[in-house]
Image (spheres, rainbow, N blue to C red):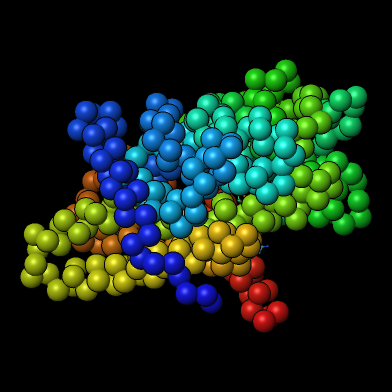
C-alpha cells in the first residue's frame, strides 16, 4: 500500500466545519443524531455548506466545485459526521453521482448537473436495488428502450432512500438483453418530477420514512442523460461503488454513541473494564480512519479502489455495531429512547451491514482480490 496522506490534511477545513455546526447547534437549528448522513435531511443546512464551498469539493471549479482533493473532502465529511449534522440532502449526489458524472458523463451532462449538486439544488436518490436485485445488482430488470431523442424507462426500484424528496434519480437499467447479465446495462439520470414516476413510502424499523418504492412507467429520459457509454453500466457502477463504500460514513454512523461513552468514561475513571473497552474501540477507529485516507488517496490518483473500499465498509460497519453494543454493555441505556443517540443507532444498526452491499458480498470481493494476488 502507498503511504497514507498526512494526518493533518484539512485542518483549516475541519475548523470551518466545527464553527458552522457549532453555530447551527447553538441556534437550535439542528439536534445531533446518529446515522445523520442517511436520516437527517435539511436542505437549508446543505445550502449553507454549499455556500461555504463544502459540497462538491472535489469537482473542478468550472462546475461549481472547489478543485480540492478527496483527502481534503474526507476532513469535512468526518467533521460533519462527528457533529451528527443534517447532511442527507446532498450526501448521495456529492459523494457518488457527481464523481460518476465527472468520470464518465458527457460535457452536456456535466454542465447541467454538477453545478446543481454543488449548489445543493439537485437532490439525488439512488435507483439501484429492485425487488429481485439487491446483492445481485446485475439482475436489474428495469428497462430502457431507445426512442427518438432519448429513452423510455420502465421498472420498479426498492429501498430508495429519500426518493420522495429527491429532484433527480440515478437509475441503473437494462438497455439490451444479453446472455451475460453484466452486459447490456446502462446508467441514467432521471428527473423525479417527470411524468410516469411514482413513489410509495416504506417505514423502517424506527418508524422513519426515508425508504421508498419507486415505479417508472415509460419515463422519458433525454439522450444526454446517459452516464458514459450505453451498455457499459456494469463496469461504471462497480467503479462508483468505491465512492459509495469507501467514505467515513461507513465508520462513523454511531459516532455520537462513542462520544457518550467517552464522556461517561471520563466520569468513571476507576472503571477498568470500561476503559479497556473504550481503548480498543478508539484504536480500531484510528486504523479505520487511516483506511479512509488510503481510499481517498487512491481516488485522488484516479483509481477505483473497489476491494479496499469493500474492506473498509466491512470493518467499519462491524465497528459501528460494536460501539452500540459497548454502550449497551455499560448498562447506561436501560430504556433507550428512539430520540437519543443510542436509540437511534440501535434501531439503525441492522441496516449498517446491508446498505451499500451486504457484509458477505463485501467479503467475497476481498477474497477474490486475495486469490488474484
Ligand atoms: C438503510 C438502507 C438504505 C438503503 N438505501 C438504498 C438506496 O437508496 N438505493 C438502493 O438502490 N438500495 C438501497 N438499499 C438497498 C441495499 O443496497 C440492499 O439492501 C443490499 O444491496 C442487499 O440487497 P437485498 O436487501 O435484496 O438482500 P439480498 O440480496 O436478498 O441478501 C440478503 C442476505 O443474503 C446473503 N447473501 C446475498 N447474496 C450473497 C452472496 N453472493 N454471498 C453470500 N451471501 C449472500 C447476505 O447475508 C445478505 O445479507 C438500502 C438498504 C438499507 C438497509
95 up-or-down from 41: above or below: below
Left or right: where does residue 362 sit relative to residue 10? right
Residue at the image point whose x is 64% and y is 79% from the top: 370
Left or right: where does residue 8 sit relative to residue 265? right
Counting from the top left corner in percent of width and height, residue 150 is at: 84, 28
- The answer to whether residue 146 shows anywhere in this view is yes
Counting from the top left corner in percent of width and height, residue 171 is at: 70, 38
Left or right: where does residue 36 sit relative to residue 270? right
Q: Quadrant of the C terminus?
A: bottom right
Residue at the image point whose x is 70% and y is 34% from the top: 109
Counting from the top left corner in percent of width and height, residue 198 is at: 66, 23
Residue at the image point whose x is 62% and y is 54% from the top: 241
Counting from the top left corner in percent of width and height, residue 268 is at: 9, 63
Left or right: where does residue 203 sit relative to residue 49? right
340 up-or-down from 283: above or below: above
Q: Depth check: give the residue in front, 181 or 60.
A: 60
- Quadrant of res 30: top left
- The answer to whether residue 309 shows anywhere in this view is no
- Quadrant of res 259: bottom left
Q: Depth check: give the residue in front, 71 or 373.
A: 71
Extreme residue toward the front, this view: 62
Residue at the image point whose x is 29% and y is 67% from the top: 282
Amino acid at each position: 500500500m502507498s503511504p497514507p496522506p498526512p494526518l493533518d490534511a484539512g485542518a483549516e477545513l475541519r475548523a470551518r466545519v466545527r464553527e458552522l455546526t457549532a453555530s447551527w447547534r447553538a441556534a437550535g437549528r439542528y439536534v445531533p443524531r446518529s446515522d445523520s448522513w442517511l436520516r437527517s435531511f435539511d436542505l437549508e443546512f446543505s445550502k449553507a455548506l454549499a455556500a461555504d464551498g463544502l459540497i462538491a469539493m472535489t469537482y473542478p471549479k468550472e462546475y461549481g466545485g472547489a478543485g480540492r482533493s478527496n483527502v481534503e473532502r474526507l476532513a469535512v465529511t468526518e467533521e460533519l459526521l462527528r457533529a451528527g449534522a443534517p447532511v442527507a440532502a446532498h450526501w448521495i449526489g456529492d459523494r457518488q453521482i457527481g464523481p460518476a458524472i465527472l468520470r464518465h458523463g458527457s460535457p452536456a451532462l456535466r454542465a447541467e448537473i454538477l453545478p446543481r449538486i454543488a449548489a445543493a439544488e439537485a437532490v439525488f436518490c439512488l435507483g439501484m436495488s429492485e425487488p429481485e436485485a439487491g446483492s445481485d445488482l446485475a439482475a436489474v430488470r428495469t428497462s430502457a428502450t431507445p426512442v427518438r431523442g432519448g429513452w423510455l424507462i420502465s421498472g420498479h426500484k426498492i429501498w430508495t432512500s429519500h426518493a420522495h424528496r429527491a429532484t433527480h434519480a440515478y437509475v441503473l437499467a437494462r438497455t439490451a438483453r444479453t446472455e451475460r447479465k453484466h452486459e447490456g446495462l446502462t446508467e441514467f439520470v432521471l428527473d423525479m418530477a417527470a411524468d410516469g414516476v411514482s413513489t410509495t413510502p416504506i417505514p423502517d424499523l424506527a418508524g422513519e420514512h426515508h425508504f421508498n418504492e419507486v415505479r417508472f412507467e415509460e419515463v422519458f429520459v433525454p439522450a444526454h442523460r446517459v452516464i458514459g457509454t450505453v451498455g457499459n453500466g456494469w463496469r461504471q457502477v462497480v467503479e462508483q461503488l468505491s465512492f459509495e463504500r469507501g467514505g467515513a460514513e461507513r465508520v462513523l454512523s454511531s459516532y455520537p454513541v462513542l462520544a457518550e461513552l467517552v464522556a461517561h468514561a471520563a466520569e468513571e475513571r476507576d472503571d477498568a473494564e470500561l476503559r479497556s473497552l473504550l481503548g480498543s474501540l478508539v484504536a480500531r477507529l484510528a486504523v479505520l480512519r487511516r483506511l479512509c485516507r488510503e481510499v481517498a488517496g487512491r481516488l485522488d490518483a484516479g483509481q477505483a479502489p473497489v476491494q479496499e473500499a469493500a474492506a473498509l465498509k466491512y470493518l467499519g460497519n462491524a465497528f459501528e455495531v460494536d460501539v452500540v453494543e459497548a454502550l449497551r454493555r455499560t448498562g447506561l441505556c436501560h430504556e433507550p429512547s428512539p430520540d437519543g443517540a443510542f436509540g437511534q443507532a440501535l434501531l439503525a444498526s441492522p441496516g449498517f451491514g446491508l446498505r451499500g452491499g451486504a457484509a458477505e458480498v463485501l467479503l467475497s470481493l476481498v477474497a477474490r482480490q486475495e486469490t488474484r494476488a
